[in-house]
Amino acid sequence: MALPFTAALRLNARRRPRHRAVCTEHEILSYQDLWGRVSNLMHALEASGVRPGTHVGLLPSNGVPTLVTMFAVTGMGAIPVPISSLLSDEDVGYILDAADVRVMILQADRFQRAAAVERVATRLCLGCEPVAPGWDALDPLMAVAPKDEPDLAHAHQRILSHTSGTTGRPKLPLRGEWAFEERAIEQGFCDADRFLAALTFSTGVGLTYTLLPLYLGATVHMLADWDPERAMAVIDAEKITATLMLPAMLRQMMNSPGFSAFDGRSLRLIQSGAGVVEADIRRVYHDKLGPVLSIYAASTEVGPIANLKGDDVVRYAHGNCVGQPFFGVEVKLLDDSMNEVPVGEVGEICARSTTQFECYYGEAELTAGTRRGDYLSVGDLGRFDAEGYLYFVGRKADVLRIGERDVYATVVEEVLMAHAAVAEVACVDVSVEGGSGQLWAAVVLRSDCSAEQLAEHCARHLPDYSRPQRYVVVDALPRTATSRVIRGKLKEQLERMNAGA
């Protein structure tokens, strides 16, 4: 078992007490400072009745209080349940009930959501006085907390998170291993890093790549909110060496006015993933900064699967290549009969490692559906080339049945993204009169372009059965907090449009 988060923090506070741990716009904390706050909160939570195994709900924001809370809750053996504040009150309530949350900790900047969590019996506020009857303040307890170090006998890495809910209700994966050592080896993170954290903690990827540098003893510079101009300013001013940016964040930054003047020479690693990193993004960053971009494939359930780095990022820019299997991970591609597919053919991506999730909480049947013997899958599809590089093709749920043929939406989208006028695109099957499905492409344009021009472009690069039958220009695509397209919602929008035509 890997070292618990809080045990790693305590060790870093001992071996490099004055080294910077966290820097924000308003404060700088050394490892000694951060450990002191975590210790105080652990004592306060114990005095409030939190015990090992208690499920503790959070509506996290990007800041020191969230970090302190995550370390304190896991350090005392309780299980944090971070919930995105972007969710509706109804979805927040569903997660609280489904996750058996018994304690809720709300920070000052989340008190406007207090009504959404009133169903929780024990409600604690951090950062100010109680907001309403039934809430208890943690700050007075922290002020009188014992000075001795808290007991870490029950410390762990277990976190009960939630999926984005792109297909129905969010699922609740419980995970106790986060592959920090494996990520450091494969992706190149180290304790000398100055890491820029700009992604919300309520996402698995944001949480992972904020805790990882602190686990290693590095310095984390935190942005309260994502802003590409601010990110570039911090990278240059603080000589940031490593960061995590989703594909949409990379595109926003390279399209920002300040990108041409952005230096970025301190960067040695930009880790990306959780979506398609298109070829133009890969080339722009490689041309400007050199081989600093790294692209990985992973999921909360399976953990890391593959990684692409260095010059390979542009050498394998097409076909959504995500690299070779991750350090410590075995990957095979299976057909529907559980047989491995030959090189070059598409199969279900199945992985085996020590860092897989434990279960979907309270969903034994759903958990069993991810198991492929001692391998695990969440329904992603891919193919291997002869050199052992993995190409992500899409999800089983996103394979579109058009007529008598299967169409991989991501393949069509990659072709359309190569058109100079296309900024974003997503393809879905739309039911039309008679019940048949048609392939429609929802397109966000960066310059004027007609449907006929897009059709001509696709005709040059795609077989006729996989060419969209209609191109619809939209202002934006519906996305999750990690910028994944919510295809079900997009399909509903287009079908309503078709019904009203």
Image (cartoon, rainbow, N blue to C red):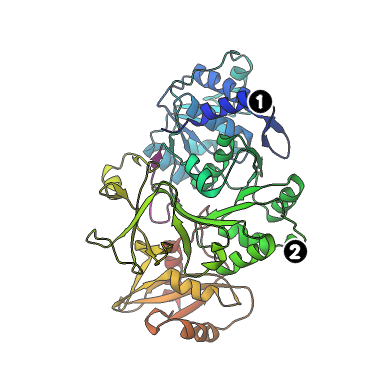
Q: Magenta-highlighted stretch: main secondary structure?
A: loop
Tell me the tag on residue 17.
1
Q: Which residue lies at the image location 37% right of the left edge and 81% below the top edge?
A: 465
Q: How far across and down, in percent of the image, does residue 139 sit?
A: 62, 22
Residue carrying label 2? 260
Q: Is residue 488 left or right of residue 233?
A: left
Q: Quadrant of the C terminus?
A: bottom left
Q: CA distance from mark 1 to mark 2?
A: 39 Å
Q: Is residue 253 left or right of residue 183?
A: right
Q: Are marks 1 and 2 in contact (CB under 8 Å)?
A: no
**Residue most extreme to the left:** 337
Q: Which residue lies at the image location 53% right of the left edge and 17% below the top edge?
A: 150
Residue 32 appears in which quarter of the rendering?
Answer: top right
**The magenta stretch spans which residues?**
164-175
Q: Compared with residue 319, is residue 42 higher up or lower down, i.e. above or below?
A: above
Asked if one can make out residue 202 in the rendered structure from this viewpoint, the answer is: no
Q: Earlier in the sequence, mark 1 or mark 2?
A: 1
Q: Is residue 232 magenta?
A: no
Mark 1 surroundings within 10 Å by alpha-carbon count, few (fewer than 14), some (14 through 19), many (20 or more): some
Q: Amino acid at mark 1?
A: Pro
Mark 2 surroundings within 10 Å by alpha-carbon count, few (fewer than 14), some (14 through 19), many (20 or more): few
